[in-house]
Image: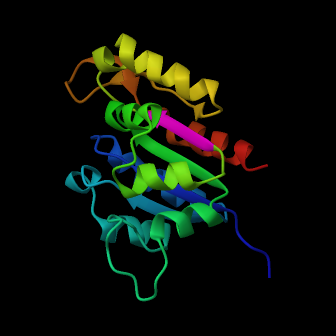
Amino acid sequence: MTRHKEIILGVTGSVASYKACDIARALANSGFSVTPILTREALEFITPLTMQTIARNKVFTDMFELPDVYDPVHVSLADKADLVLIAPATANVIGKLASGICDDLLTCAVFAAKAPVLIAPAMNENMYAHKIVQGQIAKLKSIGYNFIGPTKGRLASGKSGIGHIAPVEEIVNHAKQLLK
């Protein structure tokens, strides 16, 4: 029996979170096992039931949920990951990763994983262009993290600018390339 490549799909609190459903569907339909981790903020935009139905896998939201058997969830998820994809990635999660802050299941799983990390930012144009955010992205790139996007498009503010999540197809294709 062949093992499907395992992708942790981290979803953070952005209005672009609904795109994570399309990403999960495309990856699952391509034969990958997709395990979603939704941050507390992501739960304001999409539900675990929706994501579980689309990904066809258990959704994780809480590092401190008691498992049926002892198994530190952030480590067990990280150990089987072939790729960690964070889409959408907010300025908050990028900042946490660049600063070494592990205060939720997603950030702990990222640091426990030996797999490549792909980040698809989505945020307000001014936030994305901020010198601190750009410095954090540069820092993460310098240690091997991969980024795709953002692109110019309609933002949550109603304005158009750089900060729109990259197109789903491009994110999926980049993930596939990293898994070869």
- Residue sitting at x 57%, y 50%: 84
- Count up the numbered dots: 0
On screen, residue 127 above or below 108: above
180 lies left or right of 27: right
171 lies left or right of 48: right
Give coordinates of residue 19: x percent, y percent. 40, 46
Where, quadrant-wise, is the N terminus in this rendering?
Answer: bottom right
Quadrant hosting residue 50:
bottom left
Say whether residue 129 is visible: no
On screen, residue 121 above or below 104: above
On screen, residue 127 above or below 45: above
On screen, residue 119 above or below 42: above
Observer-nearest of 101 and 149: 101
Give coordinates of residue 129: x percent, y percent. 37, 13
Q: Main secondary structure of the magenta part?
A: strand
Render colour scheme: rainbow
Name, please, the residue furthest toward the bottom: 68
Give coordinates of residue 24: x percent, y percent. 50, 57
- Residue sitting at x 38%, y 64%: 51
| Residue 125 on the magenta span | no
Observer-nearest of 27 and 179: 179
| Residue 119 on the magenta span | yes
Quadrant hosting residue 116:
top right
Give coordinates of residue 41: x percent, y percent. 24, 49
Say whether residue 93 is visible: yes
Q: Which residues are magenta?
A: 117-121
4 lies left or right of 106: right
